[in-house]
Amino acid sequence: MKLPGHDAIARQADEHLVTHKVKLPRKVVEHPFRQVAKRVLMALLVLAATALIVYLDRDGYNDNSDRSVDFLDSWYYATVTLSTTGYGDITPVSDAARLTNIFVITPLRVLFLIILVGTTLEVLTERTREAWRLDRWRSTLRDHTVVIGFGTKGRSAIQTVCATGLKKEQVVVVDPSGKAIEAATAEGYAGVIGDATRSEVLKRAEVHKARKIIIATQRDDTAVLVTLTARQLNKAAKIVAAVREEENAPLLKQSGADAVITSASAAGRLLGLSVLSPAAGMVMEDLIHQGSGLDIVERPVIKAEVGRTPRHTDDLVVSVLRGHRVLGYDDPAVGTLELTDRLITIVRVSPGAQVTPDARPLPPMPSS
């Protein structure tokens, strides 16, 4: 087992102490700083326009200090007027200046206040709306799929399950990288920033209500810790994990994973198969690429197939699931198909077609 020492594992579990948060997909991704900067720029433009109007009509104003209004006084008057401070030291005295204040300065004052106060209200409204969306998301989310790690493996896993008909709203991504979560939310998935080895992070992803959990971390030791934590929070979910080293697979299964995929050896086997037979390699690549060409599908036995052998079904049957056993299509123990059996078949999927994922409740985890 190639795992670092206990001290290194403990350090890894404690090093992500930053506040973790949930990020839901958003249509508008403009940075808040840019939004505020735009509002401030608009306010400055309104202020400058008001000062220019006052300066052009400066003869119609009276300054109590020196009886004249210069360029600086125009800016001063525009500032105190738009902010509704109004010290009264500079006042419009001519009819033209007063009419300008009524029909021009006053609308500019209202616009100025809308820009500045509106920014504050929008921020508060956005926070309230985001909090409401988050509460609603948590209350309605269940039987979803949690993907730990949004790297190459995690992305490919999500694309595969979504190709079978899973909605993006039913996928939650957990990753310690903020950039990875931003990429996930940009693609329409909900994301949680944080270390998935910590139970509070997985709770924010509603792991305890999840139906399936995919663990696609970069390190094998991290995958072990995540599997242990996820299984502790959810006893019924189906957990599939990926590891780099094949010798670490048994530890993942002991930690609670239902299935373990060895990424390095699987890629190596596909490379070897492609060397021996490029055509066979192309077929295997087609089979693992869901949504087009040939797909491997698990489905229940229909009533018309009960009593038949796997060879006499309309689909190309590869294996038969009977109870917790996976039997080959030519296994003598299969005999004839039963209504409680499930079939692993190879079907041809046309582009754009989707295979509805299995919706039946997961069986309880067998005691080890």
Image: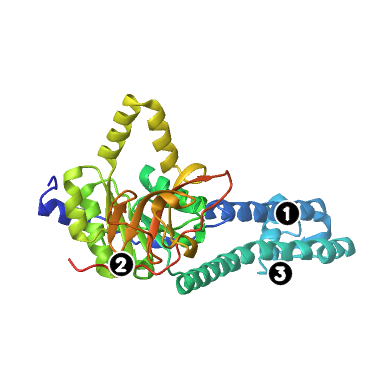
Question: Label 2's element?
Answer: helix
Q: In the displayed structure, would residue 269 be above or below residue 122?
A: above
Please name the residue that numbered disc 2 is placed on.
200
Q: Earlier in the sequence, mark 2 or mark 3?
A: 3
Q: Which of the labelled discs sits on residue 51, or is there none?
A: 1
Q: Kindly report the distance in space between the C-alpha atoms of the residues bearing marks 1 and 3.
A: 16 Å
Q: Position of residue 69 (x, y in %)?
A: 75, 55
Residue type of the residue flagged with mark 1: Ala
At 12% across and 47% down in the image, what residue appears?
1
Mark 1 vs mark 2: give the one in front. 2
Q: Kindly report the distance in space between the C-alpha atoms of the residues bearing marks 2 and 3.
A: 58 Å
Q: Earlier in the sequence, mark 1 or mark 3?
A: 1
Q: Is residue 200 left or right of residue 68?
A: left
Mark 2 vs mark 3: give the one in front. 2
Please name the residue that numbered disc 3 is placed on.
88
Instruction: Answer whether labels 2 and 3 touch (C-beta < 8 Å).
Output: no
Q: Kindly report the distance in space between the C-alpha atoms of the residues bearing marks 1 and 2.
A: 55 Å
At 84% across and 64% down in the image, what residue appears?
103
Residue type of the residue flagged with mark 2: Glu
Q: Position of residue 41 (x, y in %)?
A: 63, 51
Choose top left, top right, bottom left or bottom right for residue 58: bottom right
Q: Position of residue 326 (x, y in %)?
A: 29, 55
